[in-house]
Amino acid sequence: MCSARQLFRQPFLSPSLLIDSKKLLRSSRPCRERNFGSRKGRIMVTRLSSSVNSTVDNGGLGKFKLNESTFLASLMPKKEIGADRFLEAHPQYDGRGVVIAIFDSGVDPAAAGLQVTTDGKPKVLDVIDCTGSGDIDTSNVVKADADGCISGASGASLVVNASWKNPSGEWHVGYKLVYEFFTDTLTSRLKKERKKKWDEKHQEAIAEAIKHLDEFDKKHVKVEEASLKRAREDLQNRVDFLRKQADSYDDKGPIIDAVVWHDGELWRVALDTQSLEDDPERGKLADFVPLTNYRIERKFGVFSSLDACSFVANVYDEGNVLSIVTDCSPHGTHVAGIATAYHPKEPLLNGVAPGAQLISCKIGDSRLGSMETGTGLIRALIAAVE
């Protein structure tokens, strides 16, 4: 139950409907009014009778229907600022030839509406992390053995794809915890899903340990020999340890191994994401489609199907630094959509300048909860000028 004042503040009601809706509230009978509080501050609560139905003449409210066009137009309110009328009068003035640099939390290159411009050009020209929050130290250089195996920075044995060109035979390796690339929301979801799977395996391990202890007790009614006492103590310790392990559970996140090399023309990047996958046959380094700096080929990758988080790779300092660029929040993509989104099949969702191209300059540091830094802002200005 709410007051009339509260009712008409609800966001889904159009301002044009307020007068008719008030008339409906006042004219509907029977109704019941109650006063609460002191004389100085009384709240009137009005409740419509259940007898009011669709046959009552509701005026504008009864005729109003929320169709698809109305809904889509409300998502991108260009009408309120006159942008739709301007574009209708000047269809060629849609941002063509203009490049907009988005200084924000980062723009998702996989986002719908941010793929091409109205004249077919690529929408996102470059994606840069100006904060350094996604940097991986790849200064460690290794050589592959006769079987094409290299030692990853995490200590894992990695197999490189035989088709990858590497004239120098040098592979730059590095690693990073994958949670350092993700937003807090995504990390929280992944931790819950991983904890659920861990709990299942953990309970199975406890059940197996208890089973072995019970079998031992049934087989050895009297435990007098020192060897039997040690054996039973070991079985009991296993059960106790497994039970206590749940209390100290702390998911730091899977480790991503990164490999950087020069194919004779460009620096290439590949990631091993097996630790993210449930299937051990997925996420292998050799199956990764190599990337290069985004501005060159405009290609991006996705860590795994579980997180569906897209990323961009940029190589610096002669292969010694790898920058993995991800969003630190969806705000930057939201801004880019308002400014330049182009949806050929849903023009009502287009941004103000659907013909414009953009550069994503991430100035929000993932390590600081997406807070922008002065260093990041200066780097973004330099990148925009270049």
Image: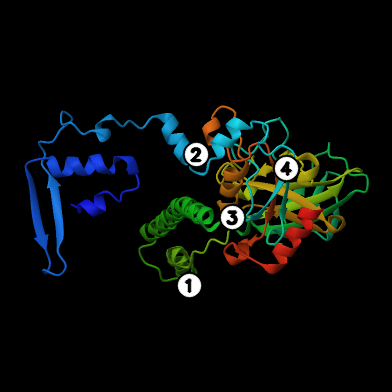
**Residue 200 x, y percent position in the rendering:** 44, 51
User: Which quadrant of the view contains residue 316?
Assistant: bottom right
Q: Which mark is residue 182?
A: 3
Of the residues shown, which amino acid type is indicated by label 1? Ala
Residue 5 vs 301, above or below: the answer is below
Q: Quadrant of residue 67?
A: top left
Left or right relative to 12: residue 29: left
The amino acid pointed to by label 4 is Val
Q: Amino acid at mark 2?
A: Lys
Disc 4: which residue: 98
Within 10 Å of the Cα at label 1, are there few (<14), some (14-19), or many (20+) other Cα atoms?
few
Alpha-carbon span between mark 1 and mark 3: 53 Å
Q: Is residue 308 left or right of residue 152?
A: left
Q: Earlier in the sequence, mark 2 or mark 1?
A: 2
Q: Inspect the image, locate mark 3, and give the three-letter code of the amino acid beneath it.
A: Phe
Say which residue appears at 48% left-offset and 43% top-offset: 80
Instruction: Report which residue position mark 1 lands on.
Output: 226
| Disc 4 crowd, CA 10 A, few/some/many (<14, 14-19, 20+) | few
Residue 170: % across, % down: 88, 52
Q: Position of residue 1 (x, y in %)?
A: 18, 52
Which mark sits nearer the N-terminus, 4 or 3?
Answer: 4
Q: What separation in Å lies between label 4 and label 3 (alpha carbons)?
A: 31 Å
Q: Secondary structure at mark 3?
A: loop
Q: Say which of 26 and 379 sits in front.
A: 26
**Mark 2: which secondary structure?**
helix
Give the tally of numbered discs. 4
Marks 1 and 4 sit apart, C-alpha to C-alpha, by: 83 Å
Viewer-nearest of discs 2 and 1? 2
Residue behind mark 2: 79
Q: Which one is earlier in the sequence, the residue at label 1 or at label 3? A: 3
Mark toward the start of the polypeptide (2 vs 3): 2
